[in-house]
Amino acid sequence: MEANQSFVNFSEKSSIKVALVGNPNSGKSTLFNALTGLHQKTGNFPGVTVDKKTGTAKLSATVTADFVDLPGTYSLYPKSLDERVTFEVLCNPVNADHPDITIVVADASNLKRNLFLVSQIIDLKIPVILALNMIDLVEKEGDTIDAVRLSEKLGVKVIAISARKKVGIEDIKQALLQPLPVPQYDFIDVKNFAGDLIDKIKAVVKVNSDFAAFQLINNFPVISYFDKKPEQKQKIEAIINASAIDHNKLQSNESVERYRVINRIASDCITEKSAIKTETFTHKLDAILTHKIYGYAIFLVILFFIFQTIFFLARFPMDWIQGLFVIISQWATHTLPAGELTNLFVNGILAGLSGVVVFVPQIALLFAFIAILEDTGYMARVSFIMDKMMRRFGLNGRSVIPLVSGVACAVPAIMSTRTISSWKERIITIMVTPLMSCSARLPVYTLLISLVVPQDKTISFFNYQGVILMCLYLIGFIAAMVSAYIFKIILKAKEKSYFIMELPVYRTPQWKTVGITIVDKVKLFLFEAGKIIVAISVILWFLSSHAPGDRYQMIDKKYASTEMIGKYNEKERDAKISSEKLEASYAGILGKAIEPAIKPLGFDWKIGIALVTSFAAREVFVGTMATLYSAGNKDNSQTIREKMRNERNPETGLPVFTLAVSFSLLIFYAFAMQCMSTLAVVYRETKSWKWPAFQFLFMGVLAYISSFIVYHIFK
């Protein structure tokens, strides 16, 4: 393919738009991080809820590049919301996000597969830089890619890089400042398949190439950018309907022809060491990790190790943090002047903060393990081995990523379902993902487990607390699968689903990336959840420290009587006064109103208040308990765990948090939809209130019934 090249130079502009495109697992996001460093932000693409990750980099003293990391796709035939965004950004020249330059990131170790997308983008006549990523792996295999010859064949700039090792990054930045060739020829001539139809479309809408018009024909039903141009939309619709084209045949013919050309180019530019490849380390490891039996067993062992480690390692910094807050509380109580402000600071703000900060070590460990599993390439294997099982429950392998991500947070997990092409499978995944125990439940789990299971209780060298924690996560997964199966029967859809995933090679995790992930997630937990927890703690402090009318004065008067002074010593009287004032407070009145509905589950009015407040965020439960048990309590030498363990039922004299109550509460939080943010994102993703409303209802009923059964079994 020879071409009369023309060039475009953007170096005279102060800012240029650069899009990063590539197949999933091609290293596109790694290159984006290497180019932009910490100068990144995340928003949404206009009109959709798909994440828009953008970043900036200084190319010279006068030129800045604005990079956008487009969702990964295998072709410009969008099958999901993510892929649709990539299609619309690249194929619509009037789109606000349309790039000046496109960097296509290709996995050099699987170049033939990646060249399909490369060739389509070349046919859009956009200035292109082809970044051959993971070139070090190709060289390690003994193969060679002639980048110069490949550049001549494709008519675009080709740069060999290794994004993980930061090799070739400066070459890309310099290439953006140089004149870039604009593809002049058609990689394939799509007029052979659509002929006059392409000319008719180009007469209605201005596009850069025949292929862009060809793609408008193929993807017209899913294109949204004509919604604001009804006249154009009607004309195009009329042209397409009059042609009675077979979209499947068009796509098939184009793909066959495209791969015919790709195979010819690959044979000219790629030299393989041998016709028969030697078995690589990745293949050997995959034989074990993706085995139909061993694969599942190894995954369970990894999960078991994670939960054991979370309890064992996090215990030490958690004890230190708890001790620190006790010291600060005691210091504040004895140093600051007595009064409302000191009471607010100690029993409102500090109590709420302690319920947040103390769980940072566990949150950090959980996200560290998730980041390591993703960065090594293992999570892709989990999707692969789970696909066959998932299909029995109305899901597919792509549902695994949202479900596993749900262990961290349901909100981004639900947003990640956009990669699922089937409407039915996507809806089912959205509906069941909140049943996976997220990191927000972790503080609740660990607090309640520690109340009834001693930390030194072990079986062999396994910690009981870690075993129970893993069981809670497995219960959530089982509930998600059973619910998915029911939805599979209820929901009807004719569309066929498919699952394609390219397994990346195994890599050593990038510890800097893991560290950045941990810091970002901990900051999110502290500042997002923390703001809610502290705000609710302050409100609860007011509600639990104040009462209507003269109720507090009456209680003080009651215990100042000669009879009470003779009956109780000073410490006992203080405890009685604190308890009765809490019940008489606004919080007590609210809790007593809720109590009849939750008493069958073993919950008292204080737990009822925590259930209400934790709807803002599940982890608010801990802050609520800390505030309620601190209200009116002059003894600040105890941690929240000790206060809850020492709490007694006034009717029975037994501990409030018995094995039955604690397990009942654990099961309730494992199943209940206790998160406003999750409901909000379900609405955003489904564009309907019926799905979040039904989700809230079915999870609430499941939580109530399960909690009731567990309480009465253990009772």
Image (spheres, rainbow, N blue to C red):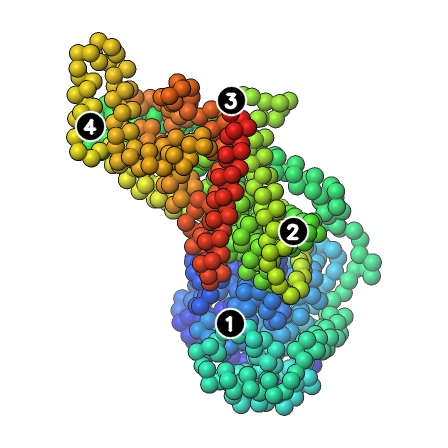
- Using the image, determine if residue 169 lies above or below residue 370: below
Residue under numbered circle 4: 552
Q: Which residue is mark 3?
A: 454
First in residue order: circle 4 vs circle 2 = 2
Q: How far apart are labels 4 and 2 at the CA level?
A: 57 Å
Q: Earlier in the sequence, mark 3 or mark 4?
A: 3
Please, what is the three-letter code of the amino acid marked with disc 3? Pro
- Res. 53 visible in picture: no
Q: Residues within 10 Å of mark 2 (few under 14, many from 20)?
A: many
Q: Is residue 141 visible?
A: yes
Q: Which numbered circle lies on residue 89?
A: 1
Q: Position of residue 29 (x, y in %)?
A: 54, 58
Tell me the kind of residue under disc 2: Phe
Q: Quadrant of the N terminus?
A: bottom right
- The residue at which mark 2 appears reads as 393
Mark 1 or mark 2, earlier in chain? 1
- Secondary structure type for disc 3: loop
Residue sitting at x 53%, y 90%:
203
Q: Position of residue 619 (x, y in %)?
A: 42, 39
The mark found on residue 78 in the picture is none
Amino acid carrying mark 4 in the image: Tyr
Measuring 25% from the left and 27% from the top, which residue is drawn there? 581
Do the numbered discs 1 and 3 sit on residues whose CB atoms are within 8 Å? no
